[in-house]
Amino acid sequence: MSDDKVINLGFGNMPNDRAYLGGLVFGKLTGEDWQVIFDNGIRDEYMRNELILQQGQQNETLYFISDGEVRIERKEGGKILEMARLGIASVFGEMSFLEKSEVSADVVADCHVVILKADGPTIEKLIERDPEFGLRFYHSIAVSLSRRLRATNALV
């Protein structure tokens, strides 16, 4: 896939010059919500070209990029196609997190990357303690997925 077809979902611009802030659509979450996620999440670091998620693996974790950039790649017909790039404040793993299913593409560190991981059981415990958090959390995921779909549709 040529670079002009790669979607940068970080702090860059979307097709048609629409600004997009990646995971910042999680703005429905309060400062307290973020603090709880950070307190209960797991910080992890990856080096350039290190595989973070592998296409086809089971996933029940949501990933927030604290620093760096990742590439979203799919293997099709023996070729690797770069689908998108995600930067600071972006989130990935939402589809497999929601569906408790397999990852649909590889996620690879494009440089040194710092990730905050929030697993399903942890998120569920947070929602049990605060159902309003759950509403804000899942609304944020829906908005994030909607924006990605719009960006993809702009390429078609």
Image (cartoon, rainbow, N blue to C red):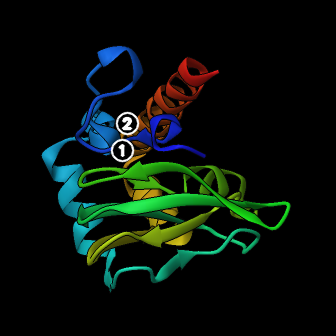
Depth order, front residue of 118/114: 114
Depth order, front residue of 2/38: 2
Question: Which residue corresponds to the image point at 71% horizontal and 57% vertical from the top-left?
Answer: 104
Please tell me whether residue 16 is drawn above or below residue 107 in the rendered image: above
- Disc 2 element: helix
Question: Which residue corresponds to the image point at 45% horizontal and 32% vertical from the top-left?
Answer: 139
Q: Quadrant of the C terminus?
A: top right
Please tell me whether residue 62 is drawn above or below residue 15 in the rendered image: below
On screen, residue 106 versus residue 29, left or right, reads right
Name the disc covering residue 133, or none: 1
Image location (x, y in percent) of residue 63: 42, 64
Residue type indicated by callout 1:
Phe
Image location (x, y in percent) of residue 148: 50, 33
Residue 27 found in image quarter? top left
Image location (x, y in percent) of residue 32: 16, 51
Question: Which residue corresponds to the image point at 44% horizontal and 79% vertical from the top-left?
Answer: 49
CB atoms at circles 2 and 1 under 8 Å apart? yes
Disc 2 marks which residue?
136
Q: CA distance from mark 2 to mark 1?
A: 5 Å
On screen, residue 59 versus residue 50, left or right, reads right
For this orientation, the residue located farthest to the left is 31
